[in-house]
Image: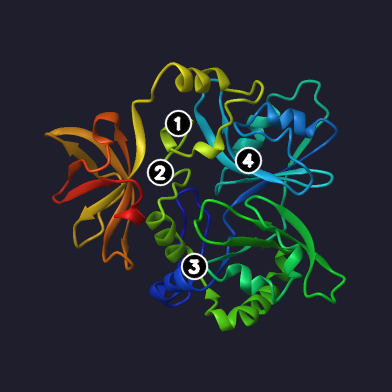
Amino acid sequence: MRLDEGTEVVSNYGSVEAEYEALVDGVGVVARNWPDTLRVRGEDRVTYLNGKVTCEIAGLGLGEGAYGFVLDAKGHIQADTTIRVLEDSVWLELPAGQGPRLLDHLKRFIVIDRVQIEPLKGLMPLTLVGSQARAALELVFEPALLPDRPWRVRHLAIERESSGEVLVSSDGRWGVPALTVWPPAADAEALVSRLLDAGRPFGARLVGYQALDRFRIEAGIPWFGRDFGEANLPQETGEDEAVSYSKGCYLGQEVVARLHYRGQVSKFLCGLAIDLDEVPCPGSVLSLEDRQAGTLTSATFSPRLGSVVGIAMLQRRAAEVGTRLDLEGGGRAKVVRSPSSA
């Protein structure tokens, strides 16, 4: 299948349902060829980036990371990003297809800063997601050395007697263990086999984009380009961990701080429990008392809940948990704290 911005991804490896179950009860191995990654080097790299993202990175140590947003001067989100601090560089993992645009955006603000920003190519991130993801990786890497907190990263030997090293990062937001191995693309196929072998006792299997998308919608995880985008402000996403309100100045901070301390945004991303047998199309209008109140951004059928769930951008008046909305084309939806709580 092809994503909206053109990236080709593997939809599934035969059974979306079996792949989804691996994510829920075992471990799914996802070859994520879609993220873009930038590498920032140079003496001023941390100071420079700290002024361009919403999260605090100036205090991060080697091997630590954070999740945040890149904004424009008006506080609008240009992309969300996972930041990882390595010995000689900082990596920015970005949504699919956003690398070239964000590269231009970040380069525009380099004046006398001693930084170099470039695409990081040639890697194939292999992400293990599921309740048994860490247990599976402990059979491949030294257990005590695996990253133990979200966004941390380590260089580790594949199998304990190996002299070759690969980057392993711990990912947040999923609500279950999630770790990513970053091999060169040429080595990815062999490493996938090794990971699947190690994870066999835990029901490991390859997982495509469809099952992962179902899992993240059910968990209430919004994605840039699907649930929010360049028209949105950070507070509208509900991703509170992405914004520091105590760090120094950064691009777009004035707008973000003003909203935080003095004002309120007029719309929010919310979870939905949807009373329909069929999954409605993203973009469907949601109404309250015969007035448009928002738009459905993502929806899927949840096997765990036995119902359709979704994510929507709703006006403040419609965003209270328990509010019932009319869905364009028929059907009703109830606002929930998270789709998984429906």
Closest to the camera, between mark 1 and mark 3, is: 1
Cβ atoms at labels 3 and 2 below 8 Å apart:
no
Name the residue that disc number 1 marks: 235
Q: Estimate how packed mark 4 is, as few (under 14), some (14 to 19) or many (20 or more) residues with alpha carbons within 10 Å.
A: few
Q: Secondary structure at mark 1?
A: helix
Counting residues from the start of the chain, the first of labels 3 and 2 encountered is: 3
In the displayed structure image, the side of residue 45 where residue 339 appears, left or right: left
Q: Secondary structure at mark 3?
A: loop
Question: Residue, x 69% and y 72% (percent of image)?
Answer: 138
Q: Which mark is residue 227?
A: 2
In the displayed structure image, the side of residue 178 where residue 308 appears, left or right: left
Q: Real-space Cα distance between discs 4 and 1? A: 25 Å
Q: Which mark is residue 208?
A: 3
- Rendered-image quadrant of the C terminus: bottom left
Q: Secondary structure at mark 4?
A: helix
Q: Estimate how packed mark 2 is, as few (under 14), some (14 to 19) or many (20 or more) residues with alpha carbons within 10 Å.
A: many
Counting residues from the start of the chain, the first of labels 1 and 3 encountered is: 3
Question: Residue, x 24% and y 34% (percent of image)?
Answer: 318
Counting residues from the start of the chain, the first of labels 2 and 4 encountered is: 4
Name the residue that disc number 4 marks: 100
Look at label 4 and name its amino acid.
Pro
Residue 166, placed above or below residue 83:
below
Q: Real-space Cα distance between discs 3 and 4? A: 25 Å
